[in-house]
């Protein structure tokens, strides 16, 4: 047997017997974790088949660029999450159902699989859909007498399924899956009755998760109702009449200002409300000028020793910092280090998103598409400012002030003009503590459901990969 010379770093090479090669010689493909997974699949209690053995056809979609405001939903990668459609950013095309190729028409019992960028998201079809898929998504017709599409979705979206996609993906910058790679994926295939049992276990756990998330969302919605009531503010009723969409102004009054109807109408509605407290501008509540973040490339790092590089994508819709996606930067200048209770606003992309920095146990800096604001603690309670800037009335202001373009944006001067109702400090603290309590209850529900659901997924994966 060949022995590696002692002067060679064993971490920089790999050895594989020729009989074990699978058409590729890149070292990544033969990583130890992939080899272990391969062994599990080969020694699974259930028979393991190649994906090509349980499919009829793999279909690519269409390429369209002429999007419409209505019509047939055009399903792209962003619309296919693990196990569900996401229509938050849906686009439409004019493509009548009579024109849809029979090879592309989405039929119950088959599966969609994202193939490019965010590849490997699997979604089983629970009914027929007259949607059109893009070329970024595979539509796979299954031999339904052999496999239940929901079972296949569960396996593909499991840790083991995702590892296979990672192993067989191609492309360094934007990974993708090829039809040839899909065909040789290994699938543990129990009898249909066992597949059905696995699906029932999964769906029970998923329903529990959805119920708890729904309860959490109801609690979060109460925050907005509570805050608006305490401040004596309200959102406008939807009015699409011609009169509501026009305004009159003298030319002398518009020099150096904005005069688009959407901005004028919304801003005047907001500041002319007779709430319980007077408005103050954010710019009058600061101790220093706003600061734009660092323009550095995000790179991988060690979360224990390196300085975190916080980007817009690291902040969720509630203003919480995500645990996943941890990055650092090559240059981490001290002038960008975040301090306790610093407020960050997103100036483009997810424009207006707000974050308050609380965890100072480890150092963090912030990225260039974020702006830091340091508050005067004698005038405004930081948590109150943060909670107000996650409210519907604040988002209404954002929709008025953001500058429409390919990518909406709000600059630091515009953020300084943000009107904030300013109760006495004791009232700010009272409001903050109430909202914090509700958010904690909501988070507890989500954590409970996620813990239960994740445990069930691990149990299911263990059942599927049960070793002889």
Image: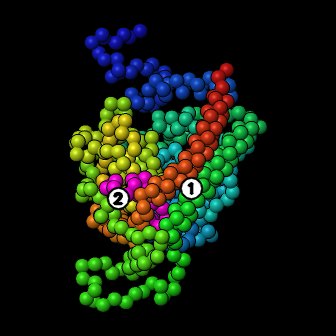
Vertical position of residue 377 compared to residue 35: above or below: below
Measured as percent of width and height from the top left, residue 341 is found at 36, 48
In which quadrant of the rendered view does residue 261 lie?
Answer: bottom left
Where residue 177 sits: x, y (%)?
Answer: 47, 44
Q: Secondary structure at mark 2?
A: loop
Residue drawn at x 62%, y 60% is 105
Q: Is residue 440 magenta?
A: no
Residue lying at 25% horizontally and 88% vertically, measured from the top left: 252
Q: Give the numbered dot on residue 379.
A: 2
Region of the chain picked out in magenta, as a range: 375-398
Instruction: Tell me if 146 is positioned left or right of 258 in this view.
Output: right
**Residue 220 - label:** 1
Residue beneath the point at 55% across and 49% down = 437
What whole-number distance in Å separates the C-alpha atoms at marks 1 and 2?
Answer: 27 Å
Horizontal side of 146 relative to 75 (left or right) equals: right
The residue lying toward the viewer, choosing from 250 and 97, is 250
Classify the position of the C terminus by image quarter.
Answer: top right
In this rendered view, identify the residue nearer to me: 411 or 25. 411
């Amino acid at each position: 047997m060949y022995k590696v010379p002692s002067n060679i770093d064993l971490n920089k090479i790999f050895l594989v017997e020729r009989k074990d090669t699978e058409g590729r010689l890149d070292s990544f493909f033969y990583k130890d974790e992939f080899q272990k997974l391969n062994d599990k699949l080969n020694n699974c209690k259930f028979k393991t088949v190649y994906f090509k053995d349980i499919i009829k056809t793999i279909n690519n979609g269409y390429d369209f660029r002429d999007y419409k405001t209505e019509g047939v939903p055009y399903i792209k990668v962003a619309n296919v999450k693990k196990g569900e459609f996401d229509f938050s950013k849906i686009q439409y095309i004019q493509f009548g159902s009579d024109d849809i190729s029979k090879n592309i028409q989405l039929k119950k019992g088959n599966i969609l699989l994202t193939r490019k960028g965010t590849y490997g998201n699997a979604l089983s079809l629970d009914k027929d859909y007259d949607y059109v898929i893009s070329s970024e998504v595979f539509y796979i017709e299954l031999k339904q007498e052999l496999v239940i599409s929901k079972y296949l979705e569960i396996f593909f979206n499991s840790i083991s399924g995702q590892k296979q996609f990672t192993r067989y993906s191609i492309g360094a910058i934007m990974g993708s899956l090829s039809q040839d790679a899909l065909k040789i994926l290994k699938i543990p295939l129990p009898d249909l009755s066992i597949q059905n049992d696995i699906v029932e276990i999964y769906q029970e756990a998923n329903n529990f998760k959805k119920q708890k998330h729904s309860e959490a969302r109801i609690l979060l919605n109460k925050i907005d109702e509570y805050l608006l009531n305490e401040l004596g503010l309200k959102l406008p009723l939807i009015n699409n009449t011609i009169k509501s969409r026009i305004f009159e102004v003298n030319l002398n009054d518009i020099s150096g200002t904005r005069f688009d109807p959407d901005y004028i109408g919304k801003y005047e509605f907001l500041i002319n409300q007779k709430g319980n407290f007077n408005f103050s501008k954010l710019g009058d509540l600061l101790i220093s000028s706003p600061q734009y973040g660092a323009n550095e490339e995000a790179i991988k790092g060690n979360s224990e020793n390196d300085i975190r590089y916080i980007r817009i994508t690291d902040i969720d819709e509630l203003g919480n910092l995500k645990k996943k996606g941890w990055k650092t930067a090559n240059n981490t200048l001290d002038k960008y280090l975040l301090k306790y209770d610093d407020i960050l606003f997103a100036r483009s992309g997810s424009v207006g998103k707000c974050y308050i920095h609380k965890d100072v146990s480890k150092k963090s800096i912030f990225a260039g598409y974020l702006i830091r604001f340091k508050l005067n603690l004698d005038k405004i309670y930081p948590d109150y400012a943060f909670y107000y800037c996650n409210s519907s009335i604040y988002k209404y202001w954002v929709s008025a002030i953001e500058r429409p373009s390919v990518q909406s944006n709000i600059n630091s001067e515009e953020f300084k003009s943000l009107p904030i109702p300013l109760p006495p400090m004791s009232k700010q603290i009272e409001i903050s503590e109430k909202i914090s309590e509700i958010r904690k209850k909501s988070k507890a529900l989500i954590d409970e459901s996620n813990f239960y659901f994740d445990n069930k997924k691990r149990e299911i994966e263990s059942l599927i990969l049960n070793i002889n």
